[in-house]
Image: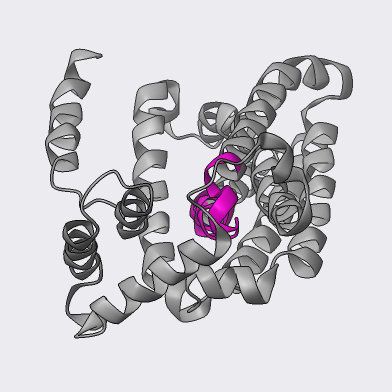
Amino acid sequence: MYGASTPLAVIMGIGMWWLPASPRWLLLCAMKRKGDMQDLRESAISCLCRLRGQSIGDSAPTEVDEILTELSYVGEDKEVSLREVFHGKCLKALIIGAGLVLFQQITGQPSVLYYAASILQSAGFSAASDATRVSILLGLFKLIMTGLAVLVVERLGRRPLLLGGVSGIVISLFLLGSYYLFLDDVPAVAVVALLLYVGCYQLSFGPIGWLMISEVFPLRLRGRGLSVAVLVNFGANALVTFAFSPLKDLLGAGILFYAFGVIAVLSLAFIFFIVPETKGLTLEEIEAKCL
C-alpha cells in the first residue's frame, strides 16, 4: 500500500523542478543584495510570464517594477518579529485567515469523514464494508468538486463560494444529526447529507480557506502570518480528532452533529461580516483595500 504511492511522489518531485520561482522572492533577493539586481529583475519578468501566460502581454516589466517599488515601500527586506503579526493590519488578516482555517476544522470535517463508511453501509452499499473503496470514491468526488471550485472561483468570487458552500454544510450537519436521532430508518437521508457535506466543503472551506490565507496577509509579514494560520489549522484538526470519540460517547452522534451544525452557523456569520472579497485584486490591492 505504501509502495503504491511512490510513483505519484516521484512524479510530483519531478514536476517541482519545473515550477518557476516567485517573482516577489527574486526581487526580495535583489533588494537584499543576494545577486545582481538586473539579472534577478529579468528572471522575475520571465517567471511572471510563465505564471500568467499570454494574458500578461507586455505588462510584465511594468508589474515587476511596481512589485519592486511596493517591496521597497513596505520594507520587506527588513527582519520582522513574530510580535508584529498581532498588531495593525496583520492582526485583521490573522483574524480572517486563522478564523477561516479554524472553522474549516471545527465544523466537523474530520468527524464526518470518520462516519462515511458506516453511513454508506447502513444505506445498503456493499462497498461500505471496505474502507479503502469508500475512501477512493469519496476522494474522487472531492477531486471533482475541488476542480469545479477552481473553475468558478475567479468568476463567482471567494465570498459567494464560501457563503453558498457553508450554507450547504449547515444543512448537511443538521440532516446527519436528525438521521441519528429521528430518521435512522431512512438511510438515504444520511447518504444525501454525507455527499452534500463533502461536496459543499470542497467548494468552500476546502480550497477557499487555503486560498484566502495566501492572499490576505500584508507582504512584509506574510511568512509569519501564514505560519500562525497553518498552526491554528492543524491544532484545530488535532483537537477535533481527539475530542470526537469522548464527545460522541458523552452526547451521542446526533447531538454532536447538531453541535457541529451550530458551529457552522457561527462560521457563516463570521464569513458574512468579517471575510472580504479578494477576487480580481493584486496582493498589494488586497492589503490597501481589505485590511
Task: Name the spot of residue 228 as percent of width and height, x first.
Answer: 64, 36
Task: Name the spot of residue 262 as percent of width and height, x first.
Answer: 84, 48
Judge left or right: residue 31 versus residue 269. Answer: left
Residue positioned 59% across, 48% down in the render = 221
Residue positioned 34% across, 34% down in the render = 136
Task: Give residue 111's quadrant in the image.
Answer: top right
Judge left or right: residue 282 versus residue 22. Answer: right
- Foreground residue, 41 or 126? 41
Q: Which quadrant is home to the C terminus?
A: bottom right
Task: Name the spot of residue 35 as percent of width and height, x first.
Answer: 23, 47
Q: Up-down: is 84 above or below 274?
A: above
Badge count: 0
- Foreground residue, 31 or 116? 31
Residue positioned 85% across, 34% down in the render = 255
Judge left or right: residue 167 versus residue 57. Answer: right
Q: Is residue 278 visible?
A: no
- Foreground residue, 152 or 102? 102
Task: Give residue 8's quadrant in the image.
Answer: top left
Which region is colored magenta?
Answer: 202-224
Task: Name the spot of residue 94 as percent of width and height, x first.
Answer: 70, 49
Q: Which quadrant is home to the N terminus?
A: top left
- Foreground residue, 129 or 4? 4
> What secondary structure do most residues of the magenta stretch adopt?
helix
Question: Is residue 233 covered in magenta?
Answer: no
Q: Up-down: is 263 above or below 119?
A: below
Question: Is residue 223 covered in magenta?
Answer: yes
Q: Is residue 110 visible?
A: yes
Q: Up-down: is 173 above or below 156?
A: above
